Amino acid sequence: MREFIIALILFIPHLSYDSSLSVDWVKVNKEIVGEGEIVEIEAKISNKGISKPFAVYFYYDFIDERHLIGIKYYESIKYYRYPKVRWDTKGLMGKHKIIVYVDGDTAFCNITICESKIKENLLIKEVYYYCYKNRDNEYICIYNAGEDIRIGEWYITTQPWKRMDKQNKIIFPDIILKHNESIYVTKNGSSFKKEKEFEADYEYYDCSTLPDIKREGKFILANDGGVVCLKDRYNHTIDVVIYGNASFNEGWNGEPIKNVKRGEILIRKDIIDTNSSKDWETKVIGQSDYEAWHGIANKGIAFCSPDCSYIVISNEIIEAKDIIINMYLFTNPFLMDKLLKENASIKLLLDGNVYGGLPMEERYIAYMLHNNGGEVKYMMSSEEIHKRYRYDHAKYVIIDGEKCIIESANWAKSGIPVDSSYRNREWGILIENKSVAKFLMKVFLHDWNASIEFNESSFTHGKPPKDYTISYFIPEGNYHSRFSAFDINFPFNITIILSPDNAEDEIIDLIEGAENEILVEQAYIEMEWNEGTNPFIEKLIEKNESGVRVFIILDGQYTINKETYEILTKNGMKVKLHNDYTIHNKGLIIDGNKVLISSINWGENSVRRNREIGVIVESKEITEYFENIFWYDWNYEIRKENEKTNFNFYFVLTIFIVTFIIIYLGRRNSKWI
């Protein structure tokens, strides 16, 4: 408005006399353009009089403020000038007349603006803007959910509100992005590969041998807040992401995405696009993104703690030549001794930040195995490595590249007890299948390569003090062992699931498929997650209301379970708080033919932030084995009371009989006196 008023002030003094200035011609660089293109308009202004200040006005269709394209000002003119302006045609489809005006004279030319926006389904899939220090590996991933499309001259900008030729941008080369294909562009290709473990497609600063993508202006993703906008070559907004303290209305609804921490990636949940923060979640850079693994095994062993887990695992260790162990906690000295007695090649991955601090027993075991030639690493952060998961809470073993053990138990005295009368209820299964072993080895190496080698001189994670001795005391309990290991010699379907990769969706689908009965045995269940109610619980409530029977066993020692108990029972489910021996299990049984054996607690960290491993087994025979254990635990208190009642009855009966015999014999003896 201010420029238009100034132009009128310059224009008014020349209205009262014949002008010596004229517009000889006006032209555009292209007479037919796509809507959104920047058009260059040029005119020739001639002077037949004295030199003077003047202004040249460019309009389209009408000479008024609304249709003003631009103004060029000059202090003087001798013979002629060639003023030029650039015109953004976004939103102006159709035929238009370009008008140039100077001192009462005008000239015209025509231009046709054609529809240019095509049907597309490209989405911004990932945005990594808040890098770890000294990494500079910010990146953006674009995903094609539609048909194959050529994206030459499409671009990404952080300044979509500016005119197209004023925006900073990184511009895609003339390539075809195929259906279901992604393309990664990063600031630093070398650092990207170090964290993501694969090559990006392009980088926008020349930092490595990776192909460079064309860049205009300073393109950097702000840490505190910004806009990332995907545009086609005509400046149409294809997709946009708003985060932090930034704001932009075109293509976005509601508040920006908040609270993304350093080292976290913004990741689109799925291809359903609501153009809001609800579409997005966060994930620590470097975490894997594996699909669930499906296959068939023909042999294995089902087992449980405290009954028979030590026997099964000990036997497998004794015969092994190559042992890969991922264990959240390893404090059982008897299992350590089994490993030390063998000449097997050993790799042991432990969590370096276990809840409550690293036990001295584990440091001792790590040192002993390391000193014996084994390789030991901790998943934890250092100056060079950043921990990818809240906890490495997985519990699995790979033996000789052909057997796998997946379980809920830590290798502690309570989890794998020597004496079967003591302590935790755990489920486990050994599976003989080279393909499963190969897949788990891939997962293991992904985590192993981003972990820190054991250093015996470390004050917090190294060799224990010289005066430390590990305890070989074997604790005993009141549990009566009942279940032997179950040898499996028939085909059964298996699905390997991982947290945080796919476990949430797989468990929800497992529950969703229930038609008659759901049995849950968990150490604890968190009812509320950050975004609302635990999705597993929401699904259980839904299935229960549909008529599916739901039974849940929780450990009675967790305070959190008391609230969970009250809420679940109010919703019609059968829930039992177990107080007689520790329930450390993380199991699920569906309709008597599917069973989940895993390390996955039903808390948000376990599902969405920890490394966890589980296996879904489809087999009535195997499921029946674990179902019998479940009902044993469910009925334990009742059985104990019955045993107590029977004990009292037989005790009283025995006393009565003995008393009767004594009296009877006494009377008989009295006759002989």
Image: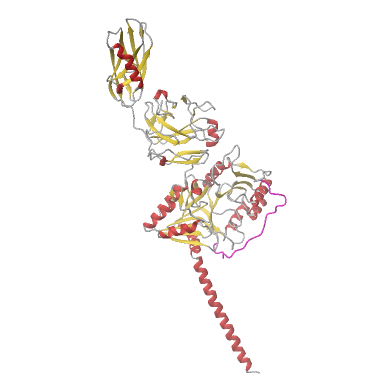
Is 358 magenta? The answer is no
The way the protein has been coloured in the rendering is secondary structure
From the image, which quarter does the C terminus lie in? bottom right
| Quarter assignment of residue 119 | top left
Which residue is outermost to the right? 467
Residue 268 in view: yes
Residue interval drawn in magenta:
462-483
Q: Residue at x 53, y 77 (%)?
A: 649
Is 476 magenta? The answer is yes
Number of marks: 0
Q: Nearer the viewer, residue 11 or 523?
A: 11
Image-based side of 644 in relation to 459, left or right: left
| Quarter assignment of residue 239 | top left
From the image, which quarter does the N terminus lie in? top left
Q: Main secondary structure of the magenta part?
A: loop
Q: Nearer the viewer, residue 118 or 237?
A: 237
Q: Nearer the viewer, residue 358 or 5?
A: 5
The x and y percentages for residue 450 are: 57, 40
The x and y percentages for residue 32 are: 31, 20
The x and y percentages for residue 398 are: 57, 48
Q: Residue at x 41, y 42 (%)?
A: 278
Q: Nearer the viewer, residue 214 or 181?
A: 214
Image-based side of 431 in relation to 69, left or right: right
The x and y percentages for residue 224 are: 49, 35
Residue 125 in view: no
